[in-house]
Image (cartoon, coloured by chain):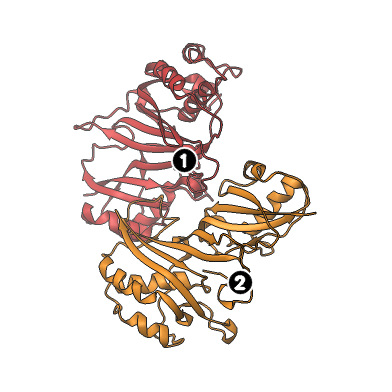
Chain colours: A orange, B red
Amino acid sequence: MSRRIKLVVAYDGTDFRGWAAQTGHRTVQSTLIEAVRQVSGEDCEITGASRTDSGAHALGQVCHFDLEAAIPAERWPAALNRALPRDIRVRSAAEVDSAFHSRFCARDRSYRYRILQNESDPFRGRFAHREPRPLDVDRMRASATLLIGLHDFIAFTAELSPDVGNTMRTLRSVGVSRVRDEVRIDVVGTAFLRGMMRRIAGALLEVGRDRRKPESLRALLVGGLNPDTQPVVLPAHGLTLMRVRYGRHPVDNRANNETASDEA
Amino acid sequence: MSRRIKLVVAYDGTDFRGWAAQTGHRTVQSTLIEAVRQVSGEDCEITGASRTDSGAHALGQVCHFDLEAAIPAERWPAALNRALPRDIRVRSAAEVDSAFHSRFCARDRSYRYRILQNESDPFRGRFAHREPRPLDVDRMRASATLLIGLHDFIAFTAELSPDVGNTMRTLRSVGVSRVRDEVRIDVVGTAFLRGMMRRIAGALLEVGRDRRKPESLRALLVGGLNPDTQPVVLPAHGLTLMRVRYGRHPVDNRANNETASDEA
């Protein structure tokens, strides 16, 4: 009888080539698989709620794996943290029902994009995109509300290929706030297309700098894919996966194309 | 007529091979020299107040250089920050008298060593040494006061060679404080021997874990160099040069061996 273990994981994505395992590259997924092998002696597959991009960070990534080893869940965080490098940390572990799936059962994901308006701080440069020019946060906030709800986000994806699939996504909230010298864009959505969060941040940055009309976001949501008006994609290092939420009862959203993948 | 420019510089030392230029390595000094060249077209020498170790950070490193270019001091921070990578930032610049010397005129240096008592935060792992086991901060603090004043710190240096020179140094204050899940060791001294700050932190960590008697620090200060009792050296990434202080009137301490070099 194998057990299914769910982990909540945080990582500084700077030195990872993203979440997804790739031969010859240091990725979060392959580093976790190796740590599980060191702790249990077993090879496993690890599935994450979100395939974060190269350089993006996570405070609350969720993943799961199946194992034969009878290691109690409460022992996993300390054991894995001893085996893991310092830029990836296991925050908690739980044994879950085999119906639980970190990706398909996720109800929504919360991402934060950080914009640093400070030229002289070298410590947050890994975790925030630097933009010293003034930003009109009220204008950004007004524009952000236009994105809430179910929309076609094809104009916000990095994929230009025709096989991108269903590009309808639901955003539950889009917040813009200033905290001292930082502007934070907090978005909660069912799931995100590849590059979507970084283009939302790019569009709002353009609005904040008066390079784009706030109402223009409405046109983007109905205009399909047009390279001339597509928002700029901001760098991945400003992005952090904050949290993945699950319902009380595991629901498998596999049939619902909208949440079948999340690539931020 | 050349001008002398004084800079206050902050850096995330993770990806630098320390301050001092070394052929074939990315160092803070050589990165700054290259940025000055890009901005002014001139080659210069840059002298820093402290030769921070590979991996150590700085919030307030001070350095100076001489240049022919008539660039006003207030233009330097923005110009250099455009030319510099994101892990090194110029916080301020000033034109100073040619008698000013960042190293020889420094009155004292403040260093902080951070100990992180949290296993699940990957973001501070670059800037703090991880020690999840309990530390008795009151015990550390009591022990720390023994280091204040003028002492022979040979037991705290990394150099075992006989040509280490004068190992007498004055510490003005040694503080130990707990801020949430972090223990901070703040030391202000005229100058520091190589590895000295990291061995002070190592000795205090040993005291905090009850592996060393608080009074034993007194014996270290009078016992010379004894590898059997020498405190452990903690890793450089926990160390940050916080500030370098200068007097109102530039004083050249070159003749005073004590402050002639600072290698933390």
Can the viewer see residue B41?
no
**Residue B56 circle label:** 1
**Relative height, residue B149 to residue A162 (above, below):** above
The local secondary structure at tag 1 comes to: loop
Q: Chain of mark 1?
A: B
Q: Residue furthest front?
A: A249
Q: Residue at image x 45%, y 27%?
A: B193
- Callout 2, which amino acid? Asn
Image point (66%, 57%), residue name: A64
Left or right relative to A174: residue B159: right
Q: Position of residue B104 (x, y in %)?
A: 32, 32
- Does label 2 lie on the same chain as label 1? no
Amino acid under label 1?
Ala
Residue corresponding to mark 2? A253
The vertical placement of B80 against A153, above or below, is above
**Location of residue A153 with respect to B7 vertically, above or below:** below
Are circles 1 and 2 on residues that touch, CB within 8 Å? no
Q: What is the C-alpha distance between the residues marked 1 and 2?
A: 47 Å
The quarter of the image holding the N terminus of chain A is: bottom right
Q: Secondary structure at mark 2?
A: loop
Q: Is residue A6 left or right of residue A239?
A: right
Horizontal side, residue A195 vs residue A216: left or right:
right
Q: Residues within 10 Å of mark 1 (few under 14, many from 20)?
A: many
